[in-house]
Amino acid sequence: MSAVRVAIAGSSGSIGTQTLDVVRAEGPQRYEVVALGVGSSTDVLIAQAEEFRPKVVAVADPARRAEVADRLPWATVVADMADLVEPADVVVNAVVGFAGLPVTVGTLRAGKRLALANKESLIAAGPVVQPLRATPGAELVPVDSEHCAIHQCLRSSLHGDEPGNPEVARLVLTASGGPFRGRTADDLATVTVEQALAHPTWSMGPKITIDSSTLMNKGLEVIEAHELFGIGYDRIEVVVHPQSVVHSMVEFHDGSTIAQLSMPDMRLPIGYALAYPARVATPFGRIDWTRTSRLDFELPDTATFRCLTLAYEAGRVGGTAPAWLSAANEVAVDAFLAGRITWRQIAECNAESLERYERSADHTVDDIVAADTRARQVAEEVLPA
Ligand code: MG
């Protein structure tokens, strides 16, 4: 059997580097890296390319592209991340934020497997992405740990992951609760960027780590689950599970709940998405039952973590509302990371931006980009001066 050809869009980030860990562990007979792409982290890209020798590398930052071409004369250097799709069998989309949309669209349109870590593209562009999933050969396998868990749980159903599986009673997404679980809004008035970046169980990039601290990440994952599995919002629930060992659950109509458990290590969902329907041979952490003596569950505190409720609202409105909220949230998170607003103001700005939602067409990529652009303008307006 020839090696599976892998492209990684966003190879310098947390998911990108962990994808290369999986490839390294599984060996070149199993996976061949054919394309890598970054925004501007060209030092990391050059080191990765020297190790894995991809045919194509993408550099989004025009100021750095020539330097990469000089250093990697044997590679084709391109500007557009969507050009990584052509030489690959599987494309890992690990771009951060809405910027990942062209890779999601390009991969599905080309009829290839999309290992999706960039949830924002699916959340924002659901109306555009859904029809592309019907392209012959196209396949969307989630890398997000909760959705990977649900994907695995659904394998116990006759209908598998077909959208709107009629055997499913509800999806239960687990949330670690982030670094501020159990704190009140007043406690959280003065939290610092460092505190918000200190996630208790998962090691991730800054955008998603802040989203975890506000529960916006879980809210976006509710929309993601709706888009991926075609289950209505009334049948998607969130429970806080601080140990991050149960990654999500599916309850079927007969009352059976199937859960997926593993140590919190993103290399498992990455390996799952690369190898599906097989499994990689390398274990990335194993549960030690002498240490994992309890698994706790509690309801989320939606008064303190308002972003979760906002995401349900946007999801139920549908159309470009999820794109709008996700874009506004990117602006608010950037403002928090830059020290322009407080942690509590992230949710306030998101709520205010969603209040001002302007319904618009959602048929094409351009429609979605227009909604994203407009939402960012509105979010900038609602940020405190
Ligand atoms: Mg997740």
Image (cartoon, rainbow, N blue to C red):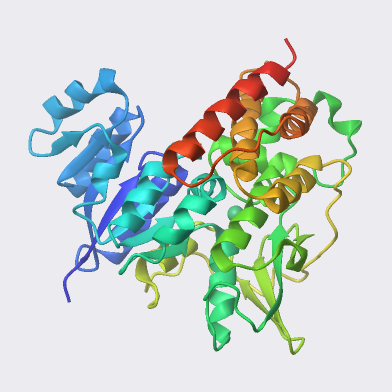
Q: In front here: 306 or 19?
A: 306
Kindly identify the residue that appears in the image at 48 percent across and 35 percent down.
Answer: 369
View extreme (left): residue: 74
Is residue 360 rendered to the left or right of residue 71?
right
Kindly identify the residue that appears in the image at 71 percent across and 49 percent down.
Answer: 317
Q: Quadrant of residue 31?
A: bottom left
> Looking at the picture, does residue 69 appear above or below residue 266?
above
Q: Quadrant of residue 77?
A: top left
View extreme (top): residue: 385
Is residue 207 rendered to the left or right of residue 85?
right
Q: Quadrant of residue 81?
A: top left
Kindly identify the residue that appears in the image at 55 percent across and 72 percent down.
Answer: 163
Q: Is residue 117 visible?
A: no
User: Where on the image, by quarter, is ligand 1?
Assistant: bottom right
> Looking at the picture, does residue 212 appear above or below residue 297?
above
Q: In front here: 363 or 377?
A: 363
